[in-house]
Image (cartoon, rainbow, N blue to C red):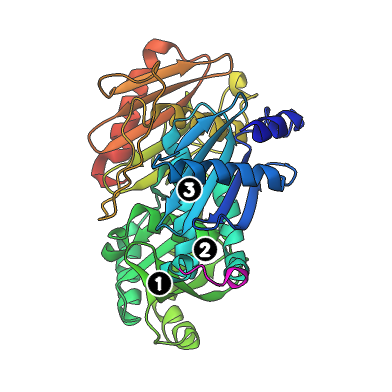
C-alpha cells in the first residue's frame, strides 16, 4: 500500500485532510481486475493507474491465498473492499471521518444496488463485453455521485427513506390510493420537495434501500412535468424492469407510481392526473408550507434544538430538520452554526453513534450481509446504550432511542447539559405520537 500512502500524502491538505470524507470509489471486474469506472468525492485529482493496480492487486493476492481482505488503514485514509456476486468489486478510499466501518460498507452496498436499479443484475454479472458495460454504466454516474457527495436528503446515511410531515394526510392518502389503483398498480408515493409525504401500503413493503434509491433517483433527475423510467428493484425484481412514472402536480410536488406497460404516460396525464389531484390542490399547496422545517405548523419544537434526525428503525423512515423552529431558528449563540453546519454536525454525530452505541436500521431481506465489521476498541461496549451525548465549543448533541425509534438532536451550546435529556425524550414522544413517523 506504499503507492497509495505516497499518493495521499502528495494531495493538497485542503483537498483531502480538511475535507468531509473525501473519497475515491473504484469499480472493477472481479475476475480480471479491469477498471470499469472511478468516481470521486471532493476536488481530487484522478487516481493514478499504479495505485488502482496496487489496490486491486493486493486484494486478488489475498483471495488467491484464501484470505478475505475487507479493510485496511493508512495514516490518512481507510480502504474498504467489497465483492458483489463474484463479478463486481467495489473499492472505496476515504479520509477518516470517525465513523465505523459499517458506514463505508453501506456506501458500497448502496452504490451496487444503484447500479442494479438502473441496469439489472444480469447486466452486472455478465462482464464479458467490457466496453459495452462501461458505456452502459455511465447512466449510473449521476446517482452514484449523489450517494458520494450527498444531497439535502439523509436517507443514504440512515438507510431509511426521508419523509415530510404534512397536514391533512388522510385525504392525500385516499387520493393517492385511488390514483394508484386507477393505474392498475399498488406501488405509489407522493413526494414533497423530494421527501415522502404519503405512500401506499405496498410501497412501504419495499426494502429501505429500494425506497431510498427511488427517492434519490427522482431527486437526481432534471425537473420536468412527467417521466417514464425503466427501473429494477434490487431485492424485489432485480432481473425484470418495471416502469417508474412520475408527474409534477405543483412545483416541488410529484406523484410517483411503479406500474406495468399500460396505461401510457399520455393516458395517465390526460385521463387520470387532473381527475384525482385537482380536487385536493389546496391541500397540496398547504403541504409546501411544511418545507423547509419538514413539519406542519401545528408541531412546535423546543427552541433549544437547532436540528434533529429521527429514524424509525422498524419501518425504515427518516425525518430530519435543520429548521425545527422555522427558518430563523436559533438564538444569538447559534448564529455561527449555519444550516449546512448543523446537518454536517448531526451526520457526524450519527455516524459516530450508530454501530458503536446504537443499532443500525436492519433490512428485512433474504440477502444477508455477512461482512464482519471491526469496531474501535475504545467505543466497543458490551451493551447497546439507550442515551448518549457529546459537547463541543459550538454546539451540543444528544441521542436517545427506544425499541423502534432513534432521535439525534443538535442543541445550542448554551443549553445546560441536565436539560438535553428531558428535552430530547419529550421531542421524541411528540414526533412519534399518533404514529407520525
The residue located at (31%, 33%) in the rendering is: 359
Ranked by sequence position, the earlier of labels 3 and 2 is 3
Find disc 2 in the rendering and name its residue.
218
Q: Residues within 10 Å of mark 3 (few under 14, many from 20)?
A: many
Give the residues drawn in magenta, as a range.
Answer: 126-132
Residue at mark 1 to residue at mark 3: CA–CA distance: 27 Å
Q: Give yes or no for residue 131 being in the magenta stretch.
A: yes
For label 3, the SS is: helix
Ranked by sequence position, the earlier of labels 1 and 2 is 2
Ranked by sequence position, the earlier of labels 1 and 3 is 3
Q: Position of residue 279 (x, y in %)?
A: 41, 73
Residue at mark 3 to residue at mark 2: CA–CA distance: 20 Å
The residue located at (73%, 42%) in the rendering is: 43
Q: Work out which quarter of the rendered image holds the C terminus and state it.
A: top left
**Residue 41 figure quarter:** top right
The residue located at (44%, 83%) in the rendering is: 268
Label annotation for residue 108: 3
Label annotation for residue 257: 1
Amino acid at each position: 500500500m506504499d503507492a497509495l500512502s505516497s499518493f495521499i500524502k502528495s494531495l493538497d491538505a485542503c483537498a483531502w485532510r480538511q475535507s468531509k470524507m473525501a473519497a475515491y470509489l473504484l469499480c472493477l471486474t472481479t475476475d480480471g481486475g479491469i477498471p470499469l469506472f472511478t468516481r470521486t468525492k471532493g476536488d481530487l485529482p484522478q487516481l493514478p493507474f499504479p495505485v488502482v493496480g496496487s489496490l486491486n492487486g493486493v486484494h486478488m493476492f489475498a483471495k488467491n491465498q484464501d484470505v478475505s481482505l475487507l479493510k485496511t488503514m493508512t495514516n490518512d485514509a481507510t480502504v474498504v473492499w467489497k465483492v458483489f456476486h463474484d463479478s463486481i468489486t467495489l473499492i472505496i478510499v476515504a479520509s477518516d471521518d470517525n465513523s465505523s466501518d459499517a458506514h463505508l460498507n453501506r456506501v458500497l452496498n448502496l452504490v451496487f444496488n444503484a447500479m442494479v436499479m438502473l441496469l439489472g443484475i444480469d447486466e452486472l454479472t455478465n462482464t464479458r463485453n467490457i466496453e459495452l458495460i462501461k458505456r452502459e454504466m455511465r447512466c449510473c454516474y449521476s446517482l452514484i455521485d449523489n450517494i458520494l457527495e450527498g444531497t439535502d436528503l439523509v436517507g443514504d446515511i440512515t438507510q431509511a427513506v426521508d419523509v415530510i410531515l404534512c397536514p391533512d394526510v388522510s385525504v392525500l392518502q385516499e387520493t393517492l390510493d385511488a390514483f394508484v389503483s386507477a393505474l392498475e398498480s399498488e406501488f405509489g408515493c407522493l413526494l414533497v420537495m423530494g421527501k415522502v409525504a404519503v405512500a401506499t401500503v405496498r410501497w412501504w413493503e419495499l426494502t429501505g434501500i429500494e425506497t431510498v434509491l427511488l427517492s434519490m433517483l427522482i431527486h437526481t433527475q432534471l425537473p420536468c412535468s412527467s417521466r417514464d423510467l425503466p427501473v429494477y428493484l434490487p431485492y424485489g425484481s432485480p432481473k425484470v424492469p418495471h416502469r417508474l412514472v412520475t408527474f409534477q402536480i405543483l412545483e416541488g410536488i410529484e406523484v410517483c407510481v411503479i406500474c406495468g406497460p399500460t396505461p401510457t404516460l399520455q393516458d395517465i396525464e390526460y385521463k387520470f392526473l387532473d381527475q384525482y389531484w385537482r380536487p385536493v390542490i389546496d391541500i397540496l399547496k398547504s403541504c409546501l408550507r411544511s418545507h423547509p422545517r419538514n413539519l406542519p405548523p401545528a408541531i412546535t419544537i423546543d427552541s433549544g434544538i437547532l436540528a434533529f434526525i429521527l429514524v424509525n428503525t422498524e419501518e425504515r423512515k427518516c425525518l430530519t430538520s435543520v429548521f425545527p423552529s422555522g427558518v430563523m431558528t436559533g438564538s444569538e449563540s447559534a448564529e455561527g452554526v449555519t444550516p449546512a453546519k448543523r446537518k454536517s454536525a448531526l451526520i457526524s454525530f450519527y455516524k459516530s453513534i450508530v454501530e458503536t452505541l446504537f443499532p443500525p436500521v436492519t433490512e428485512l431481506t433474504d440477502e444477508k450481509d455477512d461482512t464482519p465489521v471491526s469496531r474501535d476498541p475504545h467505543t466497543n461496549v458490551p451493551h447497546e446504550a439507550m442515551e448518549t451525548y457529546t459537547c463541543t465549543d459550538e454546539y451540543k448533541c444528544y441521542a436517545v432511542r427506544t425499541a423502534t425509534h432513534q432521535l439525534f438532536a443538535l442543541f445550542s451550546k448554551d443549553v445546560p447539559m441536565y436539560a438535553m435529556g428531558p428535552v430530547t425524550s419529550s421531542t421524541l414522544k411528540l414526533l412519534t405520537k399518533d404514529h407520525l413517523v
